[in-house]
Image (tube, helix red, strand yellow):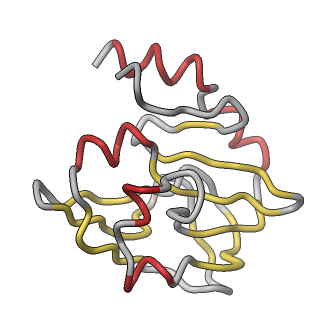
Amino acid sequence: MASLDHPTNLKYSKSDEWVRIEGDEAVVGITDYAQDQLGDIVYVELLTDAGQTIEHDTKFGDVESVKATSELLSPISGEVTRINTALKDSPELVNDHPYGEGWMFAVKLTDPSQLDELMSAEKYLEYLEGR
């Protein structure tokens, strides 16, 4: 796990999603650990569109890899402002750049206090070691 990246400027959920604050938006994706566990990602289905509201801990899509299909759970609530449509044609971006081009969606937060419930990079690494 030492070679996996977990940037300190992000917040992490127990379901292996990350959140990055960019101005008044929160960008969400899956962690380097999650994509590593899944293996080669062959399909990403996002069940939400810009303008829709998403609730904390609800399903926002699925990731299919050569190993398994996994549900994606939103670590935060908010109004979806944009989704990463590039993942439809290039799902491998999640493997190659999980914190960059492999992001999944962005929201305008409805409850910023939810960020306090997420883990720091240090706490996330401790959590992973306990799995």
Work out whether 85 lies above or below 19. below
Work out whether 66 lies above or below 43. above
The residue closer to the viewer here, 71 or 18, is 18
Work out whether 12 lies above or below 91. above
The residue closer to the viewer here, 13 or 110, is 13
| Identity of the residue drawn at 48% across and 53% down | 98
- Residue 112 at x, y = what percent? 79, 48
Give the image quarter of residue 34. Answer: top left
Q: Residue at the left extreme? A: 67
| Identity of the residue drawn at 56% across and 85% down | 49
- Residue 23 at x, y = what percent? 89, 58
| Identity of the residue drawn at 55% across and 63% down | 103
Quadrant that contains the C terminus: top left
Q: In the displayed structure, does residue 89 sit left or right of residue 24?
A: left
| Identity of the residue drawn at 59% across and 28% down | 119
Quadrant that contains the N terminus: top left
Work out whether 40 lies above or below 14. below
Q: Residue at the right extreme? A: 23
The residue closer to the viewer here, 8 or 124, is 8
